[in-house]
Image (cartoon, rainbow, N blue to C red):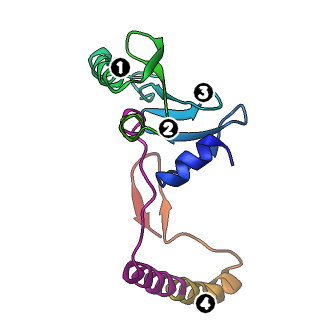
Amino acid sequence: MSIIETFAEAHRLHTKLDECGERIIPGKQGQIHEYSDSELGVMFMMPNTDKEPWGRWCPKLWGNFRRAAVAAGMIVRQNADSEGCLSFDPRSRAQSKLAIQIARVRPKKVLSEEQKAVMASRLALARQARTANQQILAPEAQVAGQLRPPFRRQGHGTGFYPS
């Protein structure tokens, strides 16, 4: 098992393969990746938005994270105006907690037995409703030859009108 998989399992984090085929821990504003055999890296990069496809400009946030990381013993590997990369020791609790916070990684939820039972009953009800709905629509489909939505578009952008 690799160091990143061990780290993800210890902190209940989700892993995935990136475009290069390397295992990462994705976050909302960055990712955690393997930096070396004994270190992990955290990349801080704001997500793209419709108005700013290159990511939001946030030098103050990156500066605050960078100062906190250096104080915790992390090493700055790349430092740009509003983004950067740090390496850290995954065995250090403080550095690991800060890296998860920097990348805004959400841990997996741990469900109790009661929550699992409630979710299973809701799923069963939804499946029953779905099969009942399909049984209701099936005769109509045989008569009409195809399923038709209950509302049909009339005109150009004038809204939905009942058929």
Circle 3: is it few (<14), some (14-19), or many (20+) Cα within 10 Å?
some
Query: Is the magenta region chiefly helix, strand or loop?
Result: helix
Side of 13 relative to 81 (left or right):
right
Q: Which residue is mark 1?
A: 70
Q: Amino acid at mark 4?
A: Gln
Looking at numbered disc 2 in the image, what kind of residue is underneath it?
Pro
Residue wearing tag 2: 90
Q: CA distance from mark 4 to mark 2?
A: 54 Å
Task: Say whether disc 4 or disc 3 marks the residue closer to the N-terminus.
Answer: 3
- The mark that comes first in sequence, 4 or 2, is 2
Q: CA distance from mark 3 to mark 1?
A: 17 Å
- Vertical comparison of 131 with 107: above or below: below
Residues rendered magenta in the picture: 100-127
Left or right: where 32 falls relative to 92: right
User: Could you give the CA–CA distance between mark 2 and mark 1, rounded to whole angstroms?
Assistant: 15 Å
The residue nearer to you, when weighing 160 against 87, is 87
- Disc 3: which residue: 35
Residue at 60% x, 32% y is 38
